[in-house]
Image (cartoon, rainbow, N blue to C red):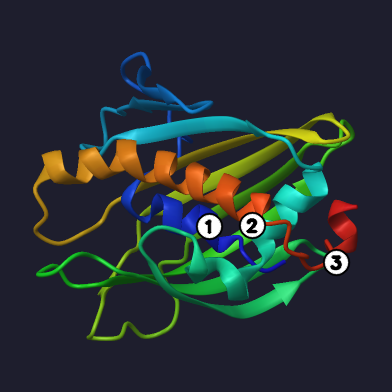
Amino acid sequence: MKKILLLACAAAFSAAALAKPAAPAKLSINKNNIKVWTFQDSRNPVFMYRAETTLNVPIEQAVALILNVEHAADWVPYLGSVKLLSRDDKKGEFQLHMVLDFPFPLQDRDLIVQGTMRKDAQGIVSIQNKAVKKAAQPNSAYVRLSQYEGDWTFQKLGPQKVKVSTYGYANPEGSIPLPVVNMFVQQQPYQMLQKMKAELAKGNAQPALPEILK
């Protein structure tokens, strides 16, 4: 269960589409078999996003990569480090501490993520993440993010094909121009799914999935 973080990192700049958008989603990127939609809720100035692609790998391999926390910083954009704080495979719950690398001169961000993972009767695997507001004492070296929600969904299309969807919303906090933030909302999920494809193409072995996802 090691990498639910991907969702989190992906959404540290971007964000989860759990609130109803005030306007229709806009297809912002459509290339290399990756689509990214952005939209906005009336309560949030930062764009939300939805992104999806299809991968020519077994669903288990794609999910295992997302759960491989120790390896996440090697390929997830803007992810400085991630630490697994707790994990209960029987309940499908986990908690992570993530540090996000922001470009100079911006201060790096961190957040505590509470996540759950499930597999439904149709075999669809979902991973849902949310920032924990009342968590460990913030480190003064980082700006603590408290508004973040995001999820991943994996749908098996065949023995060697899976549809991957991700949604997200996050408030990056601090003095960052809104246009800059919203630019990242469009680009970050696209970059992440590209890197995910490249990482899976290497064919590296991944940890076994927890029983709750088998």
Q: How dense is the environment of label 1, judged by Cα within 10 Å: few (below 14), some, or many (20 and up)?
A: many
Q: Disc 3 designates what residue?
A: 90
Quadrant in which residue 114 is drawn: bottom right
Front one among 17 and 9: 9
Disc 1/disc 2 C-alpha distance (Å): 6 Å
Number of the label disc, if any, that sits on residue 66: 2
Image-quadrant location for residue 116: bottom right
Looking at the image, do the residues carrying marks 3 and 2 touch, with CB atoms under 8 Å apart?
Answer: no
Identify the residue at image location x=67%, y=69%.
Answer: 2
| Amino acid at the residue labelled 2 | Ile
- Label 1 belongs to which residue? 6
Q: Left or right: where does residue 6 sit relative to residue 38?
A: right
Q: Residue at x 76, y 41 (%)?
A: 57
Q: First in sequence, mark 3 or 2: give its number.
A: 2
As helix, strand or loop, the secondary structure at mark 2 comes to helix
Query: CB under 8 Å between callouts 1 and 2?
Result: yes
How many numbered circles does the render carry? 3
